[in-house]
Amino acid sequence: MNFPADFTSLLSRTGKLVALTGAGVSQESGLRTFRDAQAGLWQQYKPEDLASPEAFARDPQLVWDWYAWRREAVKGVRPNPGHYALVELEAKIPAFTLITQNVDGLHRFAGTRNLLELHGNLQRVRCSDCGTFAETWENDSGSVPRCMHCNGLLRPDVVWFGESLPRDPLEKAVEAIRTCQVFLSIGTSGLVQPAASLAHAAQSNGAVVVEINAEATPLTPKTDFFFQGKSGELLPKLIQAVWGN
Ligand code: OAD
């Protein structure tokens, strides 16, 4: 992939950049994207039918077990060159913010510092009644653990369909987008709001919108630059093309 000169020159001069990542960034670490078919036991369910407050109310054990399985799938998974290239990008750009919809924790593991986890984190758990966070809980293979304060059922600290995003990271994301010069959308289908609207907000605030994705998405026709390919390959090449190391 040869990046056009107007793009590399723009990036080398950029003082403020926001990147938004989705499940595609973790695909090369061996994790399924959200909209890939599910594996094994879980094939009969759609993620959309498990990641909701209604699903948890209907069958907390089923939802807990699905998240226990996903936590297990993330164990031993390591960041890939795409995650590490974003750590390098943070070192190159004076004001860098990484907004992620991923709950796998791989950006933090790789070393990204200014990170906003919009959809929470798989490894955290909180009480579904009183909201108290739990650092530890009973073995994942057992029944749904309960809160030590109010005996409510514990749930993963992730955002489910129909729930609002956590206020603090969302406010910081909106603020970063208000003034960024470049908005980089990577490995996300852009189907879920309000994350999906962040690119449009950035563009109306004057940012150049760039997309890296294995496939075209609904955002693609509106981008200023679209680079088709795997983020684990393209992001390191992008750093190389702009900064030459
Ligand atoms: P999706 O599974 O919807 O989309 C993954 C995107 O990554 C697709 O556009 C793929 O083309 C692209 N892709 C796959 N492999 C790639 C690679 N190696 N390099 C670059 N791109 C690649 O996942 P998300 O967009 O993250 O929300 O989904 C967003 C949210 O929708 C999730 O956080 C989840 C889901 O509903 C909640 O659970 C609230």
Image: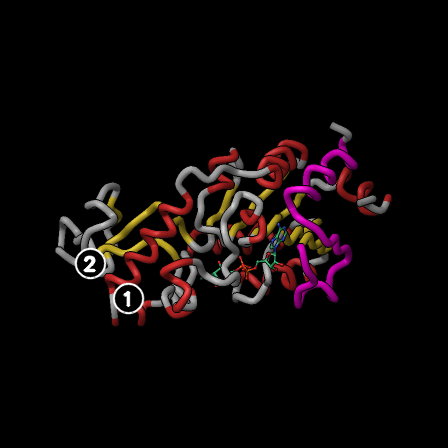
The numbered disc on residue 153 is: 2
Q: Quadrant of residue 46?
A: bottom left
| Span of residues in magenta | 214-243
Element class at badge 1:
helix
Which label is found at residue 206? Answer: none
Q: Assign the N terminus to one quadrant of the image.
A: top right
Tell me which numbered mark, 1 or 2, is placed earlier along the sequence.
1
Mark seen at residue 56: 1
Q: Is mark 2 within 8 Å of ligand 1?
A: no
Marks 1,2: beta carbons within 8 A = yes
Residue 162 occupies quadrant? bottom left
Q: Is residue 83 left or right of residue 42?
A: right
Query: Disc 1 to disc 2, how far (Cα)?
Result: 10 Å
Was residue 244 drawn as part of the magenta stretch in this picture? Answer: no
Q: Quadrant of the C terminus?
A: top right
Instruction: Give the class, few, some or many, for how many residues have Cα within 10 Å of label 1's Cα (few <14, many ≥20).
Output: some
Percent of width and height locating residue 2: 83, 44
Q: How many marks?
A: 2
